[in-house]
Image (cartoon, grey):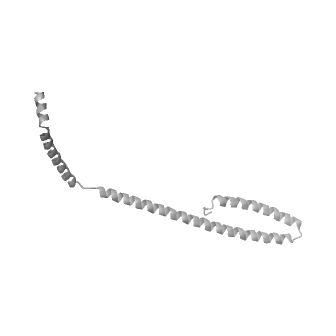
Amino acid sequence: MGDKLEGFVADHRPEFDRHFDREKRLWQKIDNELDNGKPNFNWIWKVAAVLFLASTVWLTVDRLKSDDEKITIVDDRLEEFQKAESFYTQLIMEKRSQISTYSNEKLILEFEGDLKHLDGLYDELRATFDQTGNDDQ
């Protein structure tokens, strides 16, 4: 019986395939119609991608802008520090020349000792400024 059935199927194969193709096309048509009934959420992904891109660009520009502002602040502070340094250096030179006119050696030695002490403090202050130039203190 199996041989007769196999022979019949083999002899009538094109007819079976023709019916199968029609059925396959019918199922594809039904599937397409069902897909059209589903809500399409692809637009949500597009909106999310655009929002992500826009926020990334905004954050990058904001960060670059704040870095430029920090550089400007540091440059302003450095300029202010240099002005103060030159002012006080000039003032010390004037005082030194005034004291050198005195004939009291003890006073001159005392002044030089104080000046060396102040120079040491200034070196510490300068090192602190170099390390923390961006700090308000």
Q: Is residue 91 left or right of residue 131?
A: right
Name of the residue lying farthest toward the front: 11
Percent position of residue 52, x then y: 40, 58
Residue under the point 63% across and 59% down: 132
Q: Is residue 39 left or right of residue 2?
A: right
Where does the C terminus fall, quadrant-wise?
bottom right
- Which residue is at a point 76% across and 71% down the rendered structure image? 91
| Residue name at image x 14 percent, y 40 percent | 14
Q: How many numbered marks does the figure carry?
A: 0
Q: Choose between 88 and 104: the one closer to the eye.
A: 88
The answer to which of 85 and 46 lies nearer the viewer is 46
Q: Determine the residue positioned at 82% across, 71% down.
A: 97
Q: Is residue 86 left or right of residue 16?
A: right
Q: Quadrant of the N terminus?
A: top left
Report whether 127 appears left or right of 48.
right
Where residue 114 appears, as percent x and y from the top left, is 79, 63
Question: Where 100 sits versus 117, above or below?
Answer: below
